[in-house]
Amino acid sequence: MTIGIIERYYDYLPVTDKTPMLSLGEGNTPLVYAEHLSDALSAHVYLKLEGLNPTGSFKDRGMVMAVAKAKENGADAVICASTGNTSASAAAYAAKAGLNCFVVIPHGYVAAGKLAQAVLYGAKIIPIEGNFDQALEMVKVLGEHYSVEIVNSINPYRLEGQKTAAYEIIEKFGHSPHIVALPVGNAGNISAYWLGFKEAHEHQLCQSVPKMWGFQAEGAAAIVRNRKISNPETFATAIRIGDPASWKLAVKAREESGGIINDVTDDEIREAYYVLAEKEGVFCEPASAAAIAGLYKQAKVGEIPKDSTIVAILTGNGLKDPDSAMQKNSEPFKPIQATEEELVKNIFEVEV
Ligand code: F0G
């Protein structure tokens, strides 16, 4: 039997005996020690592989809650705006729950794997000539006038489900880490983690809470600049957002935890994306690598306390975005003749 986060964290979630025990097996993701990063940053760095959730991103934790509650409340359709992962997750859980799903996406800015998921799960996909922020505005207006349940993170059940990752981290360590680093887009995840850690502390599951370190892409760093960005741009399309919905909650998480929200450049994100793959064997998507880029940035200015325990949240699976990965190949592949001689020549770069 699949046990998901609703069943596992039943006591900590706003569920009732009428809430369907919906699950695709989300949660309980690995926390992997990162030797290379730990050496490089003089800290103990762990990677929480949220890309191993059923649809390949952290969104499944919140989505299973939002869709289960929509079902409980008698909805027959859900809708979301998305840079890709939310739509993949909404489409999957809606399929499982027997609901219709509508997704509104910025045309041309959703990674191939994410779009393929929404297509195959059977969502109705509506691409717009606009960005995520515009898509979310449209969805909000629609949600007011029609009986479709919005499953973006403005739906409070999303944060409730997402907070379970904080409980898992505490369970694995027996206490809180010093720092939790994560990418910030629409700012739901950083808000949810903070909610989870605070609650776990109230339930006396941990004696302290971590500092929340969030990182935005430089071209989409509204919270860092303290102003909306009307034309957000970044290679990490998942966090290409200029007016985060949970802006205030994210600022609260930063302030209450004594944390930071900083920005990282696309080059820094790309470098971290490669380091994770080449040195840690972890293939995440570009947005997830922003967390690691941020840690490098803080280390450079001496902001990482020596030997501190850090958990970096790798929010999405690298397979979602094959095009970004293939950009690393500077030249297209050229096949060789299928002979042993040619193979030896190519591998050892010698004439035989
Ligand atoms: N990482 C990934 C892989 C994401 O897909 C997102 C957001 C984030 C980080 C940022 O998380 O929005 O909670 O601050 N993706 C949303 C989507 C916007 O539509 O899939 P956040």
Image (cartoon, rainbow, N blue to C red):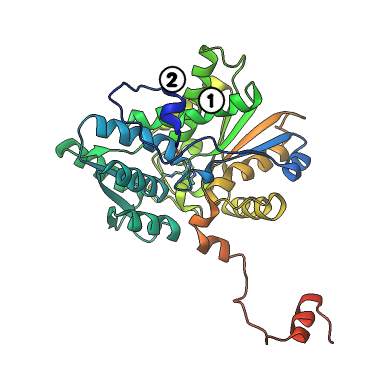
Q: What residue sits 29% from the left and 52% below the top?
A: 123
Q: Nearer the viewer, residue 238 or 177?
A: 177
Is residue 169 shown left or right of residue 236? right
Q: Name the residue under label 1.
A: 167
Residue 5 vertical position relative to residue 124 in the rendered view, above or below:
above
> In which image quadrant can residue 338 be found?
bottom right
> What distance separates the C-alpha of mark 1 from that of mark 2?
10 Å
Is the distance from the Cβ of mark 1 to the nearest ligand 1 atom less than 8 Å? Answer: no
Q: Mark 2 points at which residue?
A: 12
In the image, farthest residue toward the front: 1
In this rendering, the count of numbered labels is 2
Task: Indicate the position of residue 47 as horizontal and vertical percent values.
Answer: 63, 40
- Residue 226 is at least partly visible in this image: no
Task: Indicate the position of residue 296 as horizontal and vertical percent values.
Answer: 68, 42
Is residue 159 shown left or right of residue 259? left
Which amino acid is tagged 2?
Tyr
Q: Residue 295 carries which label?
A: none
Q: What residue sits 25% from the left and 43% below the top?
A: 99
> In which image quadrant can residue 119 be found?
bottom left
Q: Are marks 1 and 2 in contact (CB under 8 Å)?
A: yes
Q: Which of 325 and 56 is in front in this view?
A: 56
Q: What residue sits 35% from the left and 35% below the top?
A: 22
Task: Indicate the position of residue 4 as horizontal and vertical percent values.
Answer: 45, 34
Q: What residue sits 42% from the left and 27% below the top?
A: 7
Q: Regarding mark 1 in the picture, which secondary structure is present there?
A: helix
Badge 1 crowding class, 10 Å Cα cut-off, few under 14, some 14 to 19, many 20 or more, is many
